[in-house]
Image: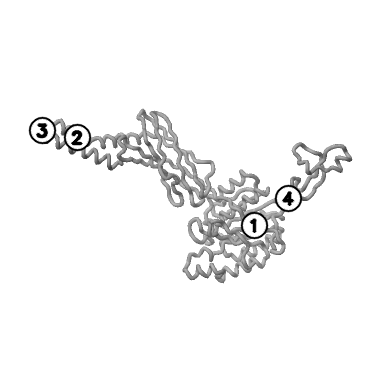
């Protein structure tokens, strides 16, 4: 449409100039010049609309991987110039994209503040630096859109999304040599009777203990024992040599997703959860419970990077001093550190219940077509196979971490366990 308008303006000016030549009227030349100047005047008005603006982003309290992230933009005009047909576009980078098909369009009254909302989507967890916004202004004739980059530096933290881990939640079968998460027995709504207590408003009538009611003349109900996990420690290996692959499908990213899922599972069970990341920044969350603690752990997982120089076996030596007997320790690694085998054995010896979540390097090799085909058939390199066999020999719970064809986490016991 803008091309049609521009063609119309130029054609009108040409005909006016031609008419002036035929009729020998200088006024028509003057009119042709005015018509040709209209696009320039319209562009100048659009340019003025981009000046004297104060821009502020309002980010959501929590942003999640793979979901539309709403961002509200507040723009304040510091002068008396009315602005019509403004638009905004986020300057995005790797793994962050604009979702809206068309930019948000809004008007700004003189010396007032207007709001516009747009959406972005992140393909990978992390902290994204939002540095500038592209503010656009339509000219009054609708010929074009002028854009100006407005500095508005902010950080957008995108959290990993917890996913269901059915094999982990169902662990505890003796024949598979897995251990249950250790539990403390508290009064609640479990299955094992704990005793009889006086009826309280809200208690289900089906739990009424009629023999006690007949004997005492007062309502009493049966109380049950509810098992709840006591303490869970999640150790994420951030050794730089243990990360294989690139982007959102790298082994480290899958381990981060697994750590987020384990934390969510443990919090839902009522556990006291401690997250320890072995990266150089020493990211660690003190033990805690509840949704706020879960969000704090997810925030730490959003920022952690595989940059540690120390392998997981050595890191567990420091962790072992903090773990109390009866605690569950989830170790997540993509490394084949033989010292991990000894560290896990020592954890068991001191009364802890370790479980290892291993991202097999051969599944993320990205090598030749032949090596990838052999990996899909179950072939593993000698070092990988020896490490897995040594770990299984300790009889600890072990799970492999992979990516399913649908892009979801696939955490399950090894096929040859």
SS assignment at label 4: strand
Evaluate whether residue 76 shows in this view: yes
| Residue holding disc 1 | 168
Q: Quadrant of residue 338?
A: bottom right
| Residue holding disc 3 | 24
Evaluate whether residue 309 shows in this view: no
SS assignment at label 2: helix
* Earlier residue among tags 4 and 3: 3
The answer to whether the residue labelled 4 contacts the one labelled 3, judged by CB atoms less than 8 Å apart, is no
On screen, residue 229 above or below 415 = above
| Residue holding disc 4 | 227
On screen, residue 348 above or below 149 = below
| Residue holding disc 2 | 33
Alpha-carbon span between mark 4 and mark 3: 101 Å
Q: Which of 247 and 83 is in front in this view?
A: 83
Q: Nearer the viewer, residue 175 or 325?
A: 175
């Amino acid at each position: 449409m803008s091309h049609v308008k521009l063609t119309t303006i130029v054609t009108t000016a040409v005909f006016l100039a031609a008419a002036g030549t035929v009729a020998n009227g200088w006024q028509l030349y003057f009119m042709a010049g005015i018509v040709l100047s209209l696009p320039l005047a319209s562009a100048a008005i659009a340019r003025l609309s981009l000046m004297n603006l104060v821009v502020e982003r309002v980010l959501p309290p929590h942003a999640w991987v793979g979901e539309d992230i709403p961002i509200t933009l507040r723009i304040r005009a510091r002068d008396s110039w009315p602005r019509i047909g403004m638009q905004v576009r986020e300057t995005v980078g790797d793994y962050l994209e604009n979702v809206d098909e068309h930019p948000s369009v809004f008007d700004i009254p003189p010396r007032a503040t207007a709001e516009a909302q747009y959406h972005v989507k992140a393909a990978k967890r992390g902290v994204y630096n939002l540095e500038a916004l592209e503010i656009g202004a339509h000219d009054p004739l609708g010929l074009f859109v002028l854009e100006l980059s407005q500095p508005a530096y902010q950080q957008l933290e995108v959290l990993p999304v917890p996913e269901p881990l059915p094999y982990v939640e169902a662990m505890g079968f003796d024949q598979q040599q897995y251990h249950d998460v250790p539990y403390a027995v508290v009064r609640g709504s479990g299955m094992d009777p704990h005793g009889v207590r006086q009826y309280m408003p809200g208690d289900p009538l089906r739990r009424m203990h009629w023999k006690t009611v007949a004997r005492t003349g007062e309502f009493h109900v049966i109380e049950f024992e509810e098992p709840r996990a006591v303490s869970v420690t999640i150790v994420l290996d951030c050794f730089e040599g243990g990360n294989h692959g690139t982007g959102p499908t790298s082994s480290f990213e899958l381990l981060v997703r697994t750590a987020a899922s384990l934390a969510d599972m443990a919090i839902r069970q009522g556990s006291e959860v401690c997250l320890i990341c072995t990266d150089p920044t020493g990211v660690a969350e003190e033990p805690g419970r509840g949704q706020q603690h879960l969000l704090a752990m997810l925030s730490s997982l959003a920022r952690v990077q595989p940059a540690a120089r120390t392998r997981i076996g050595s890191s567990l030596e420091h962790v072992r001093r903090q773990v109390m007997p009866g605690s569950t320790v989830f170790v997540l690694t993509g490394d084949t550190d033989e010292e991990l085998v000894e560290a896990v054995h020592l954890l068991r010896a001191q009364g802890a219940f370790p479980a290892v979540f291993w991202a097999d390097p051969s599944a993320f090799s990205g090598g030749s077509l032949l090596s990838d085909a052999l990996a899909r058939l179950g072939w593993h390199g000698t070092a990988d196979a020896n490490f897995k066999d040594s770990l299984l020999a300790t009889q600890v719970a072990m799970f492999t971490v992979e990516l399913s064809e649908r892009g979801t986490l696939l955490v399950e016991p090894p096929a040859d366990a």
